[in-house]
Amino acid sequence: MGQVRHGSATTTEAVRRAIQRSEESVRALARHHGISPTTVQKWRKRAHTADAAMGPKAIHSTVLTAEEEAMVVAFRRHTLLPLDDCLYALQATIPHLTRSALHRCLQRHGISRLPDMTADKPAKQKFKAYPIGYFHIDIAEFRTEEGKLHLYVGIDRTSKFAFVELHENADRPTSVIFSEALLEAVPYNLHTILTDNGIQFADLPRNRDGWTARYRVHRFDQICREHGIEHRLTKPNHPWTNGQVERMNRTIKDATVKRYHYDSHDQLRDHLQIFIDAYNHGRRLKTLRGLTPYEYVARIWTEDPDRFKIDPYRHTPGPNT
């Protein structure tokens, strides 16, 4: 097997051994092998013939301090978050942290790969790709000291842009109010809405083929038709079909009613609005390649403005909002 040498080497292992064994002068050996006297002196001092290791003697980051590296390692081991999620969470504290620097740091400490915890779980299937304008809608129940409220949630399958409203009732008129508010709030045109089979959105399955249902169109369907929107329904008794909005419901609950106590409905409404604004304008998502929902919408605006009703930059929070 041939010897592997680094690119700047001027001697082979055989030459180095000959130098170490020879009793000739440094100048004579340099002239004989066609190398510098400094090289001869270097190999005479060494007890081996292998190239010395290149690079720093102690491996360390050129981007992170020791304290910042310790923070990154502790955060990864405690949260077990994926690389991109760690990056987005830590950049608020370490602004100069880059994805490559984070990856190298995790590699140095042997934690670049997360433990496999999906052995017993079925393989995930990707959602079919759609242009922006495909909204999932659902209703969740919230409680404060004053009583029960119903949260209407709508989230775009592609941009992840979310819109919510709290109402005291969960009936057909309230669903109509929410749908009209949703159409007003979203800066682009909707082409599809997916809901469950609740009476707030559609007639019951057993009544849909009756004469009354045929000639008395559900008001929610009427609004969809007026705006050229296809209204799709999930398969009965299959709530996971509408999984995106179900997951958003859980995210909202984890950030509000499961963490805080609210003395009034208004307290919940104020906090909920702050959370949704922070989500739409400040939460960077891996599925959007590190963009926030609003940044993704703004990017689509530059690429395909025909899908929009108004300039989405009008939704940018200002100093007085």
Image (cartoon, rainbow, N blue to C red):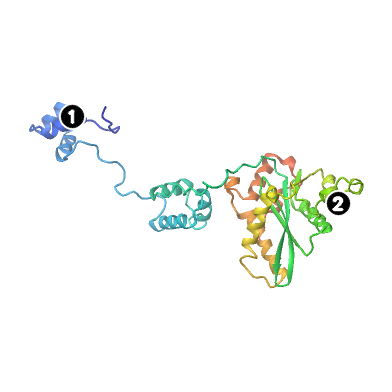
Q: State which quarter of the image contains the N terminus.
A: top left
* Residue 257 percent coordinates (x, y): 65, 65
Amino acid residing under circle 1: Ala
Amino acid residing under circle 2: Arg
Side of 27 relative to 90 (left or right): left
Q: Residue at x 29, y 33 (%)?
A: 6
Q: In front: 25, or 300?
A: 300
Side of 70 relative to 319 (left or right): left
* Residue 248 percent coordinates (x, y): 66, 54
Q: Residue at x 13, y 35 (%)?
A: 20
For residue 28, the mark is none
Q: State which quarter of the image contains the C terminus.
A: bottom right
* Residue 28 percent coordinates (x, y): 11, 29
2 vs 1, front mark: 2
The local crowd at label 1, few if under 14, some if 14 to 19, many if 20 or more residues have their Cα within 10 Å, is: few
For residue 219, the mark is 2
Q: Which residue is mark 1?
A: 14
Q: In front: 123, or 164?
A: 123
Q: Secondary structure at mark 2?
A: helix
Mark 2 vs 1: CB contact within 8 A = no
Which of the two labelled residues, at mark 2 and mark 1, occupies the earlier sequence position?
1
Q: Residue at x 60, y 48 (%)?
A: 291
